[in-house]
Image (cartoon, rainbow, N blue to C red):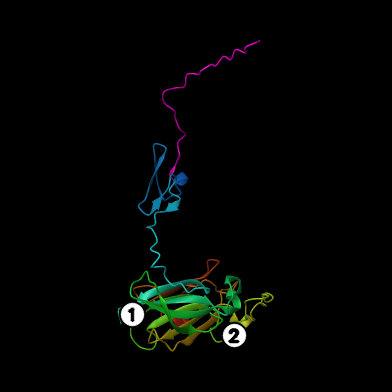
Amino acid sequence: MHVALVVVVLLRLPAVLTTAPLCASDIDCHLNGVCVGGDCRCDPSWAGPTCGRLNLQPVNPAQMGYVKRNVTSWGGNAIRGDDDKWHMFVSEIPDGCSLNYWNPNSQVIHATADSPAGPYTKVAVALPSWAHEPQLIEQRSKGPNRFVLFHVGLGNHTPGPVKCGPPTPPAPPPAPPPASLGSTVHTSASLDGPWRPVLGPFSSSSQPCTNPAPFLHSNGTWYLRCIGGDMHRAPSGVRTLT
């Protein structure tokens, strides 16, 4: 009978293990913090070992903004009204369609809530299809142009929406006609409407003005940034954006 002899050799490990530095410069911290001694010290709004994660608070399931079961929605912003309620204008894709049918099905709906976080309840359709990417701004002056709503599309049933749902999804819809490209501006004296077009559709020199991002300066000048980097400016009101 043979007995195998097993020899175990233990290697002596160093008492302290060293780790590689996480950063060599602030760029390694995504410019959301500073690099100090190889570690990222994040700004308050950022977190993670390299400051690449937003430092968000936990989500309250009871406050989820605008949520409607089995209906797709997109984007939107909210402002506080004279009734102390919060009013949100958001894209909604009706007729059982997914976000793939945002064009031509998106419409802008008006929803309200008691707090800015929601939950929001749908009040009405502010603009019918096709209207998408709404951005609402309130002007300090009262009158028929107090509330200004920027969006993509015309918001006048052009083109009409398609129907989706079982048993067989419809074929992808055709591209909208050129008249519905670019951004449109609607104004109203009330958050409840009616909304009337004052400008649109307008486009940049090279492409339609989509994803409109408006800003109203304290001196009354309007600025509007479009996707692709084009900037529009209007010192005398939204009617004259150039």
Q: Is residue 201 visible?
A: yes
Q: Are marks 1 and 2 in contact (CB under 8 Å)?
A: no
Residue 126 is one of the magenta-drawn residues: no
What mark, if any, has residue 57 been given in the picture? none
Q: Position of residue 203 (x, y in %)?
A: 56, 76
Q: Position of residue 191 (x, y in %)?
A: 39, 83
Q: In this view, does 16 lie above or below 173?
A: above
Q: Which amino acid does label 2 sit on?
A: Thr
What mark, if any, has residue 158 been given in the picture? 2
Q: Where is residue 7 in the image (x, y as percent from the top left)?
A: 57, 14
> Magenta segment, which residues?
1-26
Residue 15 lies in quadrant: top left
Q: How far apart are marks 1 and 2 (CA)?
A: 30 Å
Q: How crowded is mark 1: few (under 14 residues within 10 Å), some or many (20 or more)?
A: few
Q: What residue type is labelled 1?
A: Gly
Residue 120 lies in quadrant: bottom left
The residue indicated by pointer 1 is 81
Most extreme residue toward the top, as rendered? Answer: 1
Residue 12 is one of the magenta-drawn residues: yes
Q: Is residue 44 above or below residue 94?
A: above
Q: The N terminus is located in which quarter? A: top right
Relative depth, front residue between 58 and 203 = 58
Q: Residues within 10 Å of mark 2 (few under 14, many from 20)?
A: some
